[in-house]
Amino acid sequence: MYNFEFEKPSTVADAVAALAGDEAQALGGGQTLIPTMKQRLASPSKLVSLSGIAEMQGVQREGASLTVGGAVSHADVAAQATDYPALAEMAGHIGDPAVRNRGTIGGSLANNDPSADYPAAALASAATVVTNAREIAADDYFQGMFDTALEDGEIITGVKFSVPQAANYQKFVQPASRFALVGVFVAKHADGVRVAVTGASEEGVFRWSEAEAALDADFSADAIAGLTLDPSDMIGDLHGTKEYRAHLVGVMTKRAVAAAA
Amino acid sequence: MPKDSGIGASPKRREDVRFLTGNGNYTDDINAHGQAYVHFLRSDIAHGTLNSVDTTAAAAMPGVVRIFTAADFEGVGGVPCGWEITDRHGNAMQEPKHPVLAEGKVRHVGEPIAAVIAESLEQARDAAEAIDLDIEELPAVVDMKAAVAEGSVKVHDDLTSNLCYDWGFVEENREAVNQAFQDAAHVTSLELVNNRLVANPMEPRVAIGEYNRSTDDSKLYTTSQNPHVIRLLMGAFVLGIPEHKLQVVSPDVGGGFGTKIFHYAEEAFCTFAAKACNRPVKWTSSRSEAFMSDAHGRDHVTKIELALDADNNFTALRTDTYANMGAYLSTFAPSVPTWLHGTLMAGNYKTPLIYVNVKAVFTNTVPVDAYRGAGRPEATFQLERVVDKAARELGVDPIALRRQNFITEFPYATPVAVEYDTGDYHATMDKLTEIADLSGFDARRKASVANGKLRGLGVNCYIEACGIAPSNLVGQLGARAGLYESATVRVNATGGLVVMTGSHSHGQGHETSFPQVIADMIGIDEGMIEIVHGDTSKVPMGMGTYGSRSLAVGGSAMVRATEKIIAKAKKIAAHLMEAADADIELKDGEFSVAGTDKSVAWGDVTLAAYVPHNYPLEDIEPGLEETAFYDPANFTYPSGAYACEVEVDPDTGKVSIERFSAADDFGNIVNPMIVDGQVHGGIGQGIGQALLEGCVYDEDGQLLSASFMDYAMPRADDVPFYSVDHSCQTPCTHNPLGVKGCGEAGAIGSPPSVVNAVVDALQSAGKTDVTHIDMPLSPGRIWAALNS
Amino acid sequence: MAKVSMTVNGKAASAEVEGRTLLVSFLREELGLTGSHVGCDTSQCGACVVHVDGKAVKSCTMLALEAEGAEVATIEGQAAEDGTLNTIQAAFQEHHGLQCGFCTPGMVMSAAALLKDNPKPSEQEIRTYLEGNLCRCTGYHNIVKSIMAASGQDVSALAAE
C-alpha cells in the first residue's frame, strides 16, 4: 500500500471538508478499498474514515420507507432492518461474517461493484441515495460498472428504501469470491414490480424490464417462464459463460418471485 | 476399549497447545536483527526478450539497500532439477537452465526479474516500480499440444523444441499392448483433463537469509518440507556453499501439500543476498505472489483406452498423456508424470498388458511439480473414470466389474514394474459398501428426485505407491538423490529421549505420533520423548516429508535407531544385573533377567550410561545415542475404495456432495485420530479439485485465476462430514512398523468418485450422451452438459 | 505517523503508526502478537480474524488507526493466565480440529464470535458461518465437529476418531 494521511471526522460537514483536497477518498468499512490499495491499484493521498460519524449510523422506519445510515455495517442492517426482511436477509449474506462487521452500505453503493448485492437491492427498492449535497434516485444513480452519479468528495450519508409489499433476493455465488455470479432482487411495490439484476451484465446492475412487465400482470414464477435475456449483454468469464449467466438470471428471478409471493 | 497410549492410541496432539494459543513459530514470525526486506519485481508478461533492466533511478530511492538482477548471478548456478528422465529412445530429457533471476528472457508471468532490498517492504516495492524494464513481448505458448506442434514458439531457444521428453513405459510392451487392443472384444476410450491446481497451503512461503561474517556461515529460514534437501540443492548446485557452512531451518510450517518440497529461487536469493549485503534479508510471499511463484500441480491431458475380452476381463490398457512442465523444471517435476504415474496404472486390477506414453511439455506458465499425491491422482483418475465408462458401455455394475478384475494374490508383480506386497481390495470394497450404505442409495435417489434434484452415486478404488522410496531403484530411474531417512535417538541420563528425525511435520503431528512408537518399544511414558525436526544443525541428515513417507521411512529409521539403543541398554542392564545379554528382557520400562526376579529400571540403565561407575567400559562406550539410516526395500501400497453421492440442481447445475465415504487400508495404524484427519483433509482437497479448483491461463499466458477471488478454495459449506474407516489392515511386509502411509490417499482417491457420481446423476436424467465432464465440475459446465 | 492507542487482550497498547499500517501488522510487528496470521491479500482466508469491540473482523483489512480506543481480543488472550485452554481451544485439541495450525487462530476467533451470538449452532450454521475462514488441512470435518462440541453438543455419533 502507498502511504496516505488518515482522518477520522465526527461530522458529515467535517468529512466533506476533509475530502475537499486532491486525491482524498472516503473510507467506509474498507473491505474492498483496502485490498485494492494493497495491490497498489488505488493511491489516495488521504483517507477520510466515515466510521466515526454518528449521524451516518442507524436504521429508521419512516412511513413507507426505511432509511439506513450511510456508515451502517452489513451486519447491522441484517440485524436491524426488521421492517424490510428481504433487505436484512440480503445484507446477512454479503461476504462473510467478519466482512459484514466492517463493510458498509455507503461503501458498497459508492463502489458499485458489478457483482455487489446492494446495488440490486437499492435499484429494486426504488431507493433514494442521500448524499451530503442532494438526493439521487437509484434509477439515476447507477451509471455502469464501478460508475455512479456521485461527484468527487460527495458522501453517501444514507439510503432511503421504499419498503415493498413483497420482496426477495436470490444470489447464485461465484465459487471463489462468493460475490454474486448472478443476483436478482425482486420487489413488488404498490406501483409495480421492480427486478434488479447484479453480477450478470458488463454494464453493472440493471433492471430487467421484460420481467417487470410480466410480473406486473401476474406476480408468479410462471409468468416469466418464457422470458430470456440476450446473452450478448452478459459477462462471460472463467466462472460462467454469457449464456449461463443469462439462464441463471431467469432461474434466480423465478426463485425470488416464488419466495416473495 | 481404545488404548490410551502407545501404538493404536489417539492422544491429544502436543503441538496443538502452541498453535491454539498463538504461540506457533512460523517463519514469518521470525525477525532477524537488522533485517532488510526483499521485493521481487516479477514479469507481468508470459514471454518476452529482456532487452534491459535499468535500476539507476530505483537504486536512488529512499531506503534502498541494493538491487539485484541476473548480472549479479554470473557464476552462480541455476535452480537445479532433481530427477532426470530418459526418453523412449534412450536419450536424456531436455533440461533448460533455471536462473535465479531472469536471464535474457522472461518465460512466465511471475518470473522474478529483479530483486530490490530495502529497509522496509514498502520502500522495496516503491523502488521496484521505478525500475525501467525493456521487454520485447513474444508470442506465448500455453496449450501443450500447440507447444509440441511443428513451428511452435519455443520457450527455450537453446532447446530443440518444447518437448522435455517423450517417455514410454513399458516400451517393450508397446507392440503387445497394441495387439491386445486389436484382439479385444470391447474397447473403452476416454479423453480427459486433469486440471491444473495451486496447492495453496494456508501459510505462504517465506525465506530469511542470514550471514555470519565472523564464521562465514550462512543460514536460511524457509517454509520447507525438507530443509536438508534445500541445504543440499541450494548449497551444492546454486550457491556453492558446503553443507557444513550452511544451516537450513524450517520451523513450524503451515501446510505443504508438495509445493513446499521444492527448492525455489527466492530461497537461494535470500541466502545469497544476505552475504552480499552483510545483513539478514527477509522475503514473505503474498498470496497473489504465491499464485505465480509456487509450483502448480497436475495439468495433464490424457487419452486412455481399456481393452476387455468377451467376459469383461481387462486385457490391456493404453494411455497417451501430455504433462505440463511449465517454463522451467521444478525440483521433482520430471518424475511426477512418469515414475509416480506410469507405475500406478495397473491400479487394483490384474490387467496383464499396459503401455503408458507421456510427453512432458514446456509452456509459458509457472512450473508444475508434485501436489498431494503427485502422479498417483492423475493415474487413479483416468483409470477409475475409464473403468466406470466401460461398465456403462457394457451395461454391468461398476462395482462388479471392478471386483471381477481385482488383484487377489500377493505379492503381485504388475506389468508396470512394481510389486505390491499386500492388499485386500475386496475387503475395502466390502467395508465401503457397508459404511456408504450403498443399499440405501435407491431410496435416497427417489427422495432427491421428489425434491426436484438429480442424485448420483460414484465409486472408485485406488492404489498408491508411498513410503518413497528405495534409493537404488530410484537411482536407476533418474533420481539425483537417495530417498532414505535418518534418525538419531539421544537418551539423556535421566531417561528422557530426544528423537532427531529427518522427517518434517507441517501439520501431520509427528511430535505426537512418533513418541507413541518409541513409548511402546521401551514401555515408558510418551511425555519422556521429544521430537526434534526441521533444523539441519540439530538433525544429522534427512530427506524430508512427502509421498506419505514420514512414518514408513522416517518412522522406520527411528525404530532402527531405538532398536540399537535398546540393544546397548540391554548390555548395560546385563552388566548391572550380572547376567548374560541374551537373557535380558525389556518390558514396561524395566529390564529383567528372564526366569528370575532381578530387574533394573530404564532410568537406572540410562543413568549408568552417563555415570559409568559400574559399567562395562572395556566392552562398550558410555552414553546412549544411536543413529540409523533406513532405506526402504520397496514402496508401500495403501489402497482403498471410495464412494460419493451427489445431488445436482438441474436448474443451475450446482453439485452438492451429500455423502462421502472412504474405506482405506493403510496397514498398521499408529494414531487413528491423526490418520482420520489426514484422510479428511485429502478428501477435502480432492473434492476441491473435482468441483471447485482450476488454475486457468488465457492464450497469452496471463493467469486468470490469480487470487482467492478467482481460484475457488473449498470452504466448510462445500463439503459434508465424511465417513472414513481404516479397519481393513494388511500390514506392509517390509518395514518394521507394518505401516503404509496415509497422507495422500484422500486426495488420490476422491476425485474420480465425485465425477463418477455426477455422470451417474446426469445419466439418470436421461443424458446418456454425457459420459464425461472435465474438472472442475462447475455449475456452468454441468448446466451446459445438461443442456447439450 | 500518528499515535494509536487501544486495549489488546485487556492491556493498554499504543504506538506511532503510518496511515497504512494494518491492524494485523500492528499486532504482529509492534506488539509481537504473531498468532494472528496473514494467509491472503484479498480478505478471504480469515487467518487474521480478531475481535474488535466484541465483533470478529479481518485484521488484515482494517487500518490500525481505525481501532483507536477499541478493545481488541486476539488468540493470545483466549487461554487462562495459567495456560488452561478455553472451551473452544480445548475442543479443537480434543477433536483434532487443527493440523498445521496456521488457520487455527482465525478459526478459533470466528468460532468464538459465532458461539457468542448462537450458543448451539447446527452443523449447517457452523459451515455457513465459516465462509470467511479457509483451512487447507482438515477438510473442515474436525473443525465443525470441534465447534459443535464446544457448544456442548454430543458429537459421538460423528465418525470415530
Image: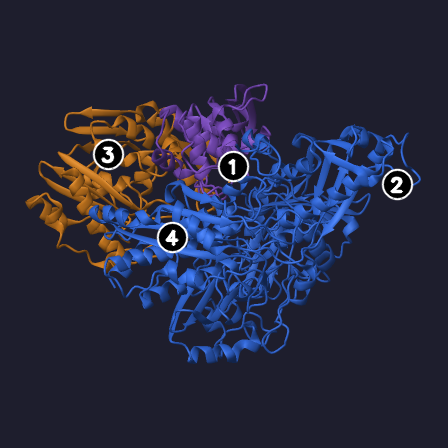
* Position of B346 relative to B510 (above/below): below
Task: Please tell me how many numbered marks the rendered image carries.
Answer: 4
Discs 2, 3 touching: Cβ within 8 Å:
no
Q: Closer to us: mark 3 or mark 1?
A: 1
Image colour for chain C is purple
Name the secondary structure under disc 4: helix
- What is the three-letter code of the residue carrying label 1? Leu
Instruction: Give the x, y percent position of residue A39.
Output: 47, 46
User: According to the image, label 4 marks what residue?
Assistant: B691
Name the secondary structure under disc 1: loop
Label 4 marks a residue whose chain is: B
- What is the three-letter code of the residue carrying label 3? Leu
- What is the three-letter code of the residue carrying label 4? Leu
Q: Which mark is residue B188?
A: none
Structural distance between the alpha carbons of marks 2 and 1: 45 Å
Structural distance between the alpha carbons of marks 4 and 2: 61 Å
User: According to the image, label 3 marks what residue?
Assistant: A87
Name the secondary structure under disc 2: loop
Structural distance between the alpha carbons of marks 3 and 1: 36 Å
Q: Closer to us: mark 4 or mark 3?
A: 4
User: According to the image, label 1 marks what residue?
Assistant: C98
Extreme-left residue of the structure: A217
Q: Which mark is residue B620?
A: 2
- What is the three-letter code of the residue carrying label 2? Ile
Q: Which callout, 4 or 2, points at the residue further toward the start of the chain?
A: 2
Image colour for chain B is blue
In the picture, one chain is orange; tell me its letter.
A
